[in-house]
Amino acid sequence: MSEWAQMRSRRDPSGSSSGSAIAASIGLALGVLAAETSGSIVLPSEHNNVVGIKPTLGLMSRSTVIPISLRQDTVGPVARTVKDAAYILSVISGKDKFDNGTDAQPFDEIPDYVKACKYSAFSGARLGIPRNGITPFVNQSTEPIMAAFETAVELIRGAAATVVDEANFASFDIDAFGRNSSILLGTDFVAQLSDYLSQLTKNPNNVHNLHGTRYDPREEWPDRDIYAWDRELERNYTNESEESYDAYQANLEMAGPSASLALSTNTTSMPW
């Protein structure tokens, strides 16, 4: 969908859940589901002027979703209004024995997300803005977005929420973060795709790993660009390798204690 839009109109609906966001935007459905590993719910929602909710990891099951990285993979709703998205979120949330990530939920009964769709729900909430994680992405094209963001921040303040500005990451480095994330997502994808394929009850094409997918003639390799797959296979790392561990630790250290301490006294009554 993204490629079609760029070719036809030179406008990018973003991705990867562009189809979901467009379907919600033009009213093909009340709401839809989208999947995100790194921006694939929130970015298409922003580009298509709809509401996308990227849930906390573990709020709903990822069972049967083709994985990239179970560290980050989530499923979330996209709809034309916040309340419609909240209705869907309430339906899809909950524990699932087939996804042990949902064991982290701190409640037995799903909160009423629709009930929280009111201005007064911000009262008592404590929110942090990591400016040094936002600034690297700000440019002339994002000025309207940032203007809307700052307006929203002031509305939240006006609703009696505490907004902690400059709740920054300890040492955010966008280039290092990108390199580390590339290693983490790539090594997880190679391993977890194999795990996913091994659980299929039927596998008519006898594809069991990324290597087998890469050389399937229907992929038309090397005429079609599968650079990301080539890169991960050529790295020959695993998600248990020293390189993967170091990348994970480096990204954790970027967050540091400062942002978490600023938000440690969380008095919000809003659902998780």
Image (cartoon, grey):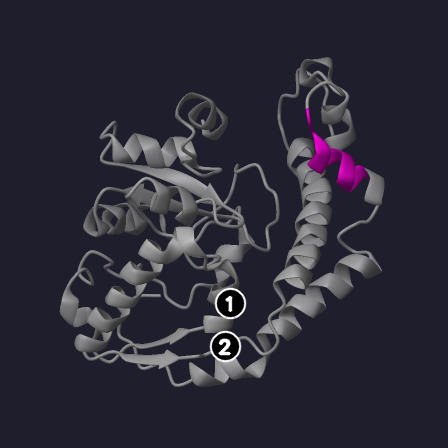
Residue in front for this viewpoint, 119 or 47: 47
Task: State the mark number for residue 133.
Answer: 1
Residue in front for this viewpoint, 89 or 20: 20
Relative image position of residue 44 (x, y in whole percent): 40, 41
Task: State the mark number for residue 256.
Answer: none
Q: Is residue 229 magenta?
A: yes
Q: Which residue is mark 2?
A: 168
Which amino acid, by three-letter code, is at mark 1? Gly
> What residue is rendered at 31% in x and 50% in y?
89
Q: Is residue 132 magenta?
A: no
Relative image position of residue 62 (x, y in whole percent): 50, 45
Disc 1 + disc 2, Cβ < 8 Å: yes
- Residue reaching furthest to the front: 140
Q: Would residue 47 appear left or right of 191 to someone viewing this image?
A: left
Relative image position of residue 77 (x, y in whole percent): 34, 45
Q: Which residues are magenta?
A: 225-233
Which amino acid, by three-letter code, is at mark 2? Asn
Q: Quadrant of the C terminus?
A: bottom left
> What residue is rendered at 65% in x and 67% in y?
251
Q: Secondary structure at mark 2?
A: loop
Q: Would residue 125 appear left or right of 188 to someone viewing this image?
A: left
Residue in front for this viewpoint, 189 or 103: 189
- Magenta residues: mostly which secondary structure? helix
